[in-house]
Amino acid sequence: MRRAALLLLLLLAPAAALADDVRESFSLDHPFAIGGRASSWMGGYFAPSLGGHLKFRPWEWIGVETFSDNFLRVQEDAWRHDHVIGFSLYEPSLIGNDVWYLAPSFGMCVDFRFAHPKDDDRPSTSDILFGMHGGLMFERYVAYGFAFEANATLYAYLGHESSVERWSATLSNELHVTPIALVTAGINYYF
């Protein structure tokens, strides 16, 4: 019994120290964060990505996040990679406190899209798409300036559709609006 109590004390002591540090969570003295993220597009296709973001929270009630995500997937007989840069505005004071929040977010982005057929002698294609997005952002401060972030976002991209035909990658002649859902998880460090 004594060993179990000692083991429980050893396990709870670091958790208590973390809880004390979490109380020192968001502060206007440390409004900047840098973070890494992993995400996946879901829609007519699935495409995983890795990326990063910078966050700036000049006041308790508003924040700005700039981001870059890099997607890669196989599209028919081609490699397609998308490089997205953009920004989101979010309102962390709506639901939550200084330790956690659930915030609506919205913003704009640009997608640099490339399709390269697997055979090197076949032509490639590229396009630039404009996107708008909105969703929910959740952030939970953990300890020592670190926070966990998760986002669920809906995007609408305006651009050409790409495809791979018999001998080349092609773009459609008409502009299309493509809806995409994005789920993101990341770690932030506030400094």
Image: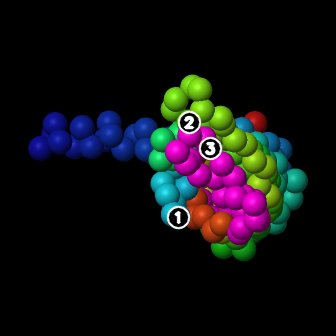
Please say if 120 is above or below 16. above
Camera-nearest residue between 84 and 64: 84
Q: Amino acid at mark 3?
A: Ala
Q: Earlier in the sequence, mark 1 or mark 2?
A: 1
Q: Amino acid at mark 2?
A: Pro
Q: Secondary structure at mark 2?
A: strand
Q: Main secondary structure of the magenta part?
A: strand
Provide the residue designation for mark 2: 117
Q: Residues within 10 Å of mark 1 (few under 14, many from 20)?
A: few
Whether residue 190 sits left or right of residue 138 in the image: it is right
Provide the residue designation for mark 1: 43
Q: Residues within 10 Å of mark 2 (few under 14, many from 20)?
A: many
Can you tell which mark lies on residue 123?
A: none
The single residue placed furthest to the front in the displayed view is 166
The single residue placed furthest to the top in the displayed view is 120
Give the CA distance from mark 2 to mark 3.
Answer: 6 Å
Can you tell which mark lies on residue 169?
A: 3
